[in-house]
Image (cartoon, grey):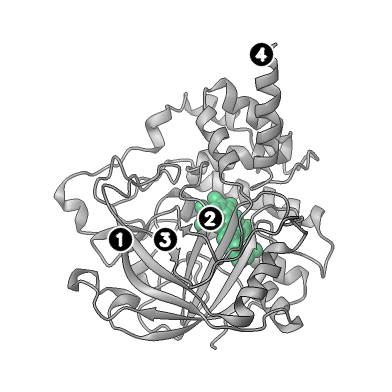
Amino acid sequence: MKHTGMMILLTAMSIAALMLFACANANSVKEAGVLSSPDAEEKQRGKLEAGDELSQNDKSDERYNVQITDGKLGGMTKFETVPADEDRRIKDMKVLLQEKMSKDYSEGQTKRDAHPKSLACLQAEFIVEPDIPAVLKVGIFEFPQTYPAWVRISSASPKIQSDKVKDLRGFAIKIMGVQGERYKTQNEEEKTQDFILVSYPIMPLGTVKLFHDAVYYSIEWSPLVFLFRLVVSGNFHIINELRKMRQNQTSPLDIRYWSTTPYLYGTNLVVKYAIVPTSNIESVMPSKLTDNYLTDNMEKHLAVHEASFDFMIQLQKDPDRMPVEDAGVEWSEKESPFIKVASLRIPSQAFRTREREELAEDLSFSPAHSLIEHRPIGGINRARVEIYRFLSEFRHKQNNKQLIEPSK
Ligand code: HEM
């Protein structure tokens, strides 16, 4: 009895958690010849071993000389290890998610597949610190400078729902007027640097295989099937993390955010990003949560005070304990504390306008919108580089809109 109760509880928690990345649409997506079940695939190739995708191929000092080769996905760094079937899994996800968007939304009304609910679109300033250690003066952080930026704050659930429902929140920063050599894969923007963060330190579905399986089973079958696979493979910690990442916050301006995935920093360093709130005021939790209390609290805050964050980097110190190919592993802050390299200032402003709502829909964020020095790395980022561009183009096309790159 005790066991059954536990299973029901876990199942209920996980169904909700799985809504983060794929809706509970059990309608089959029939793209025969394009999509194949992960099981069939494993049988064809021989069994996948758990560690296969996570190993780092080079632990010598030489790994710090980044060599970028021109592979199918636009070239890999020496820090990365690409599984043979990754490309196909990424293509599968593109097809599955595009089909799901076509079913979920009618033409002219198409929202993002993930993070569709915009909580605020805020005008901001990104201020590069003057006293960064010389070795960290790289890319956008080379010179002290203040850049204009847009911030889109969102809820992660693929369903637009009340703020009362616990969720992961997104914090996407688009810095404008950025000069320098561009990362060239799927990067249609010319002078932006995007930093995309969420309100949890890790992405529990940290490999392309895990993320793909979650999307595949949730859309083709049901989130329960994916959950069952996690349970039978003993991956309770993933179920638990998916549950923990969803929370009721006081205000999106009061909390920390993390990139969860790694990025190159210059040519010989690998980092993750985080932002830490530094505002003088904090919101209070309303006695009764309402559908838009997160936006209401931000409105109250920004009506009277600016909001601010420290923008920090965390250096990879050890490739095994701080892997590039698994975003589900938290990099220990004890071993590598975050270092401040910039500030984000969000001036006092009125943001609940039609123009801002439209801008929030029109903008496209991607890890690919980057200088070459900050290029995205690791499996989840390789997938995102392909998928964000593809689905953003699809979303804009469905809405009869052009992709836009803001300059101010
Ligand atoms: C392979 C894994 C992932 C897939 C397939 C995926 C998919 C997507 C998609 C389709 C969008 C909407 C893109 C658009 O239409 O413009 C999106 C937005 C977003 N994703 Fe992911 N995502 C993944 C991993 C992550 C991770 C690890 C993070 C952690 C930082 C993240 C954070 C966000 C945020 C904050 C947004 C909203 C950006 C905005 O405001 O426009 N995603 N994701």
Q: Is mark 1 on a helix, strand or loop?
A: loop
Please tell me whether mark 4 sits on a helix, a strand or a loop. helix
Q: Residue 2 carries which label?
A: 4
x then y, percent, for residue 287: 72, 56
- Dot 1 amino acid type: Ile
Residue at the far front: name it: 287
Residue under numbered circle 1? 68
The residue to which callout 3 is attached is 274
Tell me how far mark 4 sits from mark 2, CA to CA.
Answer: 33 Å
Count residues near mark 2 (Cα–Cα under 10 Å), then give few for <14, some for 14-19, many for 20+: many
Q: Name the residue beneath numbered marker 2.
A: 199
Lower position in the chain sequence, tag 3 or tag 1: 1
Extreme residue toward the left, this view: 61
Residue drawn 43% across and 29% down?
A: 50
Q: Between disc 4 and disc 3, whose residue precedes? A: 4
How far across and how far down the image is residue 385, in percent?
51, 60
Q: Is residue 166 depicted above or below 297 in this figure?
A: above
Please identify the quadrant where the C terminus is shown: bottom right
Disc 3 + disc 2, Cβ < 8 Å: no
Q: Which amino acid does label 4 sit on?
A: Lys
Question: In the image shown, does 250 or 11 lie closer to the viewer?
Answer: 250
Q: Nearer the viewer, residue 13 or 399?
A: 13
Give the residue displayed 19% in from the left and 69% down from the top: 135
Q: Residues within 10 Å of mark 4 (few under 14, many from 20)?
A: few
Estimate how packed mark 3 is, as few (under 14), some (14 to 19) or many (20 or more) residues with alpha carbons within 10 Å.
many
Q: What residue type is labelled 3?
A: Ala
From the viewer's perspective, tell me whether residue 148 is left or right of residue 183: right
Answer yes or no: is residue 60 visible.
yes
Tell me if residue 73 comes above or below residue 5 in the rendering: below
Quadrant location of the N terminus in the rendered image: top right
Left or right of 191, for residue 393? right
Q: Distance from label 3 to label 1 (Cα)? A: 26 Å
